[in-house]
Amino acid sequence: MTAIRITSRPLRGWKRARRWVLPLAGFVVIIVFIAPYLVMLLDALRPAGEVLSVPPTLFPKTWTPAAFAQVVTDPAFDNWLKTSLIVAISSTIIVILVAIPAAYFTARFTFRGRVAFLGLIVVTQMFAPTSLVVGIYREFYDLGLINTYGALILTDAAFNIAFGLWILQGFFAAIPKEIEEAASIDGSGRFGTMIRIMLPLTLPGVVTAVTFTFIAAWNEYVVALTLIQDDALKPLTVGISAYVTAYQQNWSQMFAASLIAIVPVVILFALIEKHLIGGMTAGAVK
Amino acid sequence: MKKYLRWGAIAAAATVTSLLLASCGASAPTGTSSKSVKSIKVVIAQYSKDQTPKFWNAFKATYEKQTGITLNLQIIDWNNIDQQSSTMVQSGDVPDILNENAYATYAANGLLYNSDQVLPAATKADIIPAFVKSGTYKGKFYGMPDLSSARALFYNTGLFSKAGITAAPTTWDEFVADAKKVTALGGGNVGYAQPLGPEEAQAEFAIWLFNNGGDFKANGQWTLNSPANVATLKFMKSLSVDDHVTQNNPGHTNRTDGAFSLFEQGKAGMVVGFSPLQGALDTQFKGVKYAIAPMPSGNAAPAQTYGVTDYLMSFKKAGNEAAVKAFYKLYYSPSEINTWIKAEGFLPVTTSGLKLFSSNPALKVYLDTLPNIHLTPTDDPEWDKIALTIKQNIGLAVGKTGDPQKFLDDLQAQAVAGK
Amino acid sequence: MDIVTPGQVAARGRSRRHRRSPGTARIGEALLWLGPALILILGVVIYPAITLVATSFNRYSIIGLRLGPAGFQNYLNFLTSPDLGQVVWNTVVWVALVVALTILISLALAQFLSKEFFGRRFVRWAVIVPWASALVISSQLFRLMFDYYHGIINQLLTSVGIIHTPIDWLGDSRYIMPSMIAVGVFVSIPFTAYLFVAGLNAIPTDVYEAARIDGSSAWSTYRLITLPLLRPAILIGVVLNMIYVFNSFPINWILNGSNPGFGNDTLITYMYKLAFKSAQHDVGESAAAGIFNVLIILIAVGIYLRFVNWRQGDKA
């Protein structure tokens, strides 16, 4: 961007122009971001054998919704979808329930071990799940949690506490102390104050944590791959990969299934996007 | 925020340090754990998304009904099974039955039952001797084969007739000449689709060197850099570097989504294939007319068929012997094993299966060679590492600047050093 | 419950400056409030991390059976492996370029997304899509699109005449890393851009009005007002992306999947190959690599924070 002098005349010209320049630019941005997924859609609408055709064609030579039909009628797909929904929703709820008190408390009070606690939170983000998965397996095997939803819910929750806690901590810290003091004069206990007075003020933070955790849990692959071997309990990410193996390639089904898997996330996002925008950096502005 | 992260970094360092200290006292993984014989854990590799679960779930039902023992079935994709089985072993959670493509290290580590312990004599007698041999480690039969496949030369008859070729090549010279003619057709056609990327390069190398009088081992000694092997790899390199009859960059092409897909799209004159490729061609790619022939031989070497078998091995755990025995007994009953092999489009491993499948003319080209099939030295634990080195690095050796001689010398040194 | 408007967020942003120091509490009460989070993290991250450390000090057969103690042998083997130098260099290039490009593009995109215009909602939904799609599948998709023979990218570029012969994006060593970086940036942008949109929304509008009265140019307004106020968001964006990009597995694993050797691996895929795909086939050495990786990312983040601190101190 070069230095543009904002004088009154060009500004008026720009004001008129931006009415169509910005939507046009917006259209270009939309195309750029969904182009690969349009290719995915076009591949899902071909017969499986046509996906790797040489030379490739952008549009299918034979249009067919067969892949979508096969995926939605595949009982295995229903199971994977169910697992993904249960795991993503449950782990998101756990993150919120666990991160709110911790965020509130670390934002409001000093205590011995606070630094160590916060340091621990950062550490959790630095370990690659790829390298932790053996240890998780061993522990969950001892606890009898292999091949259970619980195993995935616990790991997804634990991996994502850090982000939720960090976001929410920023919000709690930003609330003026006077508000809280007024509430405690009312006779509310600490927990009651947090729930009734503080929590509504941190709604954007909660929404941000929800979005982030839900997406992360929805897309988690490495841990689920190892902890879940029962086909009926696999989440979508792991299950979908089975459409393409060394001996059999159903690219169009894999892509059809993947597109269906994107939908719940985009719907969730469309519903809460307005609240999300305010939330994401509150933790940062500190 | 910054301060917070900086504390974090400091605390993190402290945490890692304390972890290092803690590790000294951390307990080591325990060995096998004893489990109730009321259930067994069976880990199966996924050959196809539909057929593998379908067969094994039916098998599970039959097994449970027959024995009253619960069969915990776990199906794992081939891409991940090494990692998963390693995780299980590290965690002391070994399965009772494991389906893998290698068994020798498990046997060498003393984890497996041998056939004397768990396989009925009649069943062992039914298994084709070549597979018994490949499953035998230090005189005991540990690697029970689940199914097999054999490789042969697939050629596109449409491209061949366009190029004026009437028969499949039988010698390497003919092979190169035919590949050149197909490549000369233009239009993106390549003479030979050569997969030397990390997916399955050891198979591609094996089939060519077996048909040039080479082998990985001879008389119990590693012969990885034998003159025949070096000549083979130089020939394989020359196909792309000098003759330009292969697809672009063979050392960076995998089998499934590279070489096979070119053949399936009718763009490759020849490829080394096996029955699953045949299955795909007959269902998804009906436009491609093809035929199957034995591999051409180099240096007038006798024709060899390269074969592969995977294994169903069983782990010694307290009290599971009877359950494992019952598993094998049921699996090798003709109605079970042959149903599965047929559904997945593979080849039998038993003499009785061979008889049953011989009625299918499409499989004749493989079945005739099955009794004399040439396998890789899977009975040597060292092979597992050699095969990995070949897969991972052979693509570099056949590149423009690659050095086949040095690659094989290094491989031989690795094998002899046993590390 | 009220919906909080950007203005309110901005107001909160201002009030933050009057924050008071927190009170003190007893450790017992702290445990009550932090307990659940602590239990989860200790159980699911720290305990497995201890297992990882223990693994790195033991010797294993290739199937994962523990054979005995190894002392520091795994670390020695890892640190002296001939491919390590190349792998570390690849990782530096990968992390530095993906993070830098992601931050720059996301800053511009965030600026755009915070303008009011017709259809903005749809643009915001579209930008979320690469984030909403599982990385394993997106990587498979890009692998197909980049393919030499059946990839749509070569097809499009040749048909519009930008290139005349197809490029082997994922097989030619000149293009492998750039292709992977392009995908890495593409999938990292959504999260980062939203982080910055939120950061922009938190900047009080009166600051801009003051600048306009002063007659500052758009660029100098951006440089002197927006960027400094966006600083905390950028800091978070850089640190989180550094960690995520460093630990990212599927892109390199899948796009580099048909290439021999270790010439295009990053530390994370190299660690995985050490355990399961290399001649070593050694989970002990791989665990040592895992510990090494955590130390590297810790040091990298530490260096970045120190650098930021130094620059800030310089300015003030």
Image: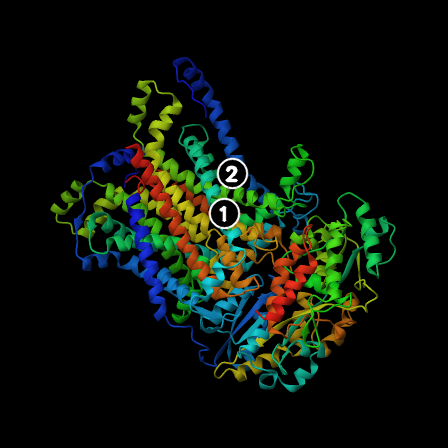
How far apart, in angstroms, are the residues tagged by discs 2 and 1? 12 Å
Label at residue A18: none
The residue positioned 59% from the left and 82% from the top of the image is: B114
**Label 2 element class:** helix
Which amino acid does the dot numbered 2 rest on? Phe
Label at residue C133: 1
Q: Is residue B299 left or right of residue B247?
A: right
Residue A97 lies in quadrant: bottom left
Residue B112 lies in quadrant: bottom right
Which amino acid does the dot numbered 1 rest on? Ser
Q: Determine if marks 2 and 1 fall on one subunit.
A: no
**Label 1 element class:** loop
The residue positioned 62% from the left and 58% from the top of the image is: B393
Q: In terms of depth relative to the viewer, which is nearer, C98 or A186?
A: C98
The image shows residue A33, relative to residue C47, as above or below, that is above
Determine contact: label 2, label 1, CB under 8 Å. Answer: no
Label at residue A33: 2
The chain letter under disc 2 is: A
Q: Position of residue C137 (x, y in %)?
A: 54, 50
Q: How is the image coloured?
A: rainbow
For label 1, count other residues whose C-alpha is less than 10 Å away and answer few (under 14), some (14-19) or many (20+). many
Q: In terms of depth relative to the viewer, which is nearer, B342 or C266?
A: C266
- Residue B267 in view: yes
Q: Position of residue C214 (x, y in %)?
A: 31, 19
Q: In terms of depth relative to the viewer, which is nearer, A224 or B201?
A: B201
